[in-house]
Image (cartoon, helix red, strand yellow):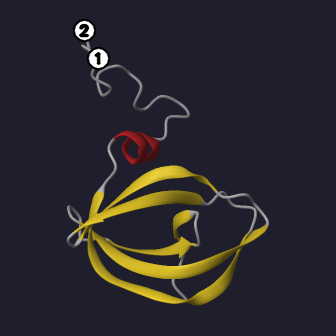
């Protein structure tokens, strides 16, 4: 059976090392509903040894699209200046993102 270029029929999904989140965050970025946003004086955020993904956000009305931008350097301090709470349009799952000044948005646990 010919997959015809369909990634689901090509055997790529389910292959060892395939990460489906990279597929959607790079080629088909999700759109969220903006629930709240806040700006504040800069706060220091230290990145440990875990990879932290950075996103670029674009917004229109109350919708936010997050696109994969890269990862942060480990063991480095950054300045947080904004935060936003968004909700997935399909699952109603809520996400909290913080803005690293001039770098982009990251998802960090809320304390």
Q: Quadrant of the N terminus?
A: top left
| Percent position of residue 39, x then y | 46, 87
Percent position of residue 49, x then y: 75, 62
In the rendered structure, find residue 66 and report the number of the disc placed on it: none
Q: Which of the two discs, 1 and 2, sits closer to the camera?
A: 1
Instruction: List the single residue furthest toward the top.
Output: 1
In which quarter of the view is residue 36 placed?
A: bottom left
Residue at point 41%, 39% (across, down): 23
Question: In this image, 109 relative to 32: left or right?
Answer: right
Q: Is residue 93 above or below residue 9?
A: below
> Pointer 2: residues within 10 angstroms few (<14), some, or many (20+)?
few
Point 48% across, 58% down: residue: 55
Q: Residue at x 37, y 44 (%)?
A: 24
Where's residue 87, x and y in %?
28, 72
Is residue 22 left or right of 46 when viewed as pictured?
left
* Residue that mark 1 sits on: 5
Who's the residue at 28% across and 75% down the image?
A: 34
Q: Quadrant of the C terminus?
A: bottom right
Q: Which residue is mark 2?
A: 2
The part of the image, by quadrant, that contains residue 58 is: bottom left
Please tell me which residue lies in front, 1 or 38.
38
């Amino acid at each position: 059976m010919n997959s015809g270029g369909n990634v689901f029929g090509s055997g790529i999904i389910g292959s060892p090392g395939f990460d489906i989140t990279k597929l959607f965050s790079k080629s088909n970025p999700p759109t969220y509903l903006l629930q709240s946003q806040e700006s504040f004086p800069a706060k220091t955020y230290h990145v440990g040894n875990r990879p932290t993904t950075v996103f670029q956000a674009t917004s229109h009305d109350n919708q936010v699209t997050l696109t994969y931008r890269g990862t942060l350097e480990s063991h480095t301090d950054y300045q947080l200046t904004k935060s936003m709470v968004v909700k997935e349009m399909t699952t109603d799952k809520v996400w909290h993102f913080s803005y690293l000044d001039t770098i982009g948005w990251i998802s960090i646990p809320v304390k």
